[in-house]
Amino acid sequence: MSWLFGYPFLTSWFQYADLPVLGRVPLASAVLFDLGVVVLVVGATVLTLVALAHQSLRKPKQRDAEEGEPS
């Protein structure tokens, strides 16, 4: 985006915003990248935990089904 506005590559935008409750808060375009990284890491972690939980619930069901089969 910096090239589109005529700035050098990897130039970050920075400005302060006055919010009613928080007061003066710094804003930067790099925060969007940081937020994307956080969402990616949290999403990957949650998906891994869900997959592990699914496997831990699936194993006992398979074992119970095998034990119930006649020999």
Image: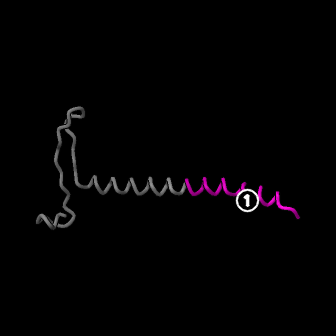
Instruction: Give the residue drawn at x 34%, y 56%.
Output: 36
Residue most toward the top? Answer: 21
- Please indicate whether residue 44 sits to the left or right of residue 56 in the image: left
Q: Compared with residue 19, is residue 9 higher up or lower down, i.e. above or below?
A: below
Where residue 62 appears, x then y in whole percent?
73, 59
Instruction: Report the magenta residues as a range.
Output: 50-71
- For the N terminus, the image quarter is bottom left
Instruction: Give the residue drawn at x 11%, y 66%.
Output: 6
Q: Closest to the observer: 21 or 8?
A: 21
Instruction: Give the residue drawn at x 17%, y 63%.
Output: 2
Q: Closest to the observer: 71 or 29?
A: 71
Residue linked to disc 1: 62
Where residue 63 appears, x then y in whole percent?
76, 58
Q: Is residue 60 part of the magenta span, yes or no?
A: yes
Q: Quadrant of residue 64?
A: bottom right
- Please indicate whether residue 64 sits to the left or right of residue 9 in the image: right
